[in-house]
Image (cartoon, rainbow, N blue to C red):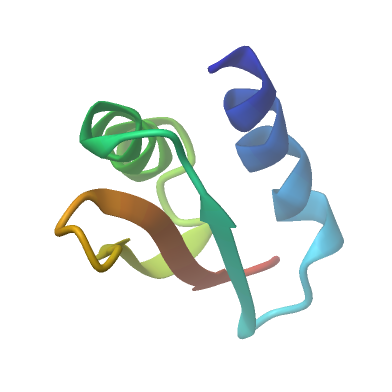
């Protein structure tokens, strides 16, 4: 999980405004935690944050637009 948080923190400075970013998590639980983290700790840095389920119905992917 620390690696995914590090990725969330670092990607803010690398994205151009309006750019798209997606990554894969390990489970529903990780996806929910990271969406909450992004919406509370990185508030205003990203827009349209959402989870996308895999074919088994597990919320595994997080997509978002962002950048400063």
Q: Residue furthest right?
A: 14
Q: For this view, does 58 lie left or right of residue 52?
A: left
Which residue occupies 43% across, 31% down?
A: 41
Q: Position of residue 18 (x, y in %)?
A: 61, 85
Against 44, residue 20 (above or below) is below
Against 10, residue 16 (above or below) is below
Front residue (pair 6, 46): 6
Q: For this view, does 8 lie left or right of residue 63?
A: right
Q: Residue furthest front?
A: 56
**On-image quarter of the C terminus:** bottom right
Which residue occupies 30% across, 63% down?
A: 54
Report which quarter residue 32 is drawn in: top left
Q: Where is residue 56 in the image (x, y as percent from the top left)?
A: 19, 58
Q: Which residue lies furthest to the left in this view?
A: 57
Against 27, residue 66 (above or below) is below
Front residue (pair 21, 48): 21
Which residue occupies 49% across, 62% down?
A: 46
Q: How many marks?
A: 0
Q: Where is residue 10 in the image (x, y as percent from the top left)?
A: 77, 40
Q: For this view, does 57 lie left or right of residue 9?
A: left
Q: Position of residue 4 (x, y in %)?
A: 60, 30
Q: Residue furthest top?
A: 2
Which residue occupies 47% across, 69% down?
A: 64
């Amino acid at each position: 999980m620390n690696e995914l948080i590090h990725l969330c923190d670092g990607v803010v400075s690398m994205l151009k405004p309006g750019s798209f970013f997606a990554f894969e998590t390990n489970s529903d639980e990780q996806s929910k935690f990271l969406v909450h983290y992004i919406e509370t700790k990185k508030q205003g840095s990203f827009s349209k944050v959402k989870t996308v389920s895999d074919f088994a119905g597990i919320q595994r992917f997080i997509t978002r637009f962002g950048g400063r």
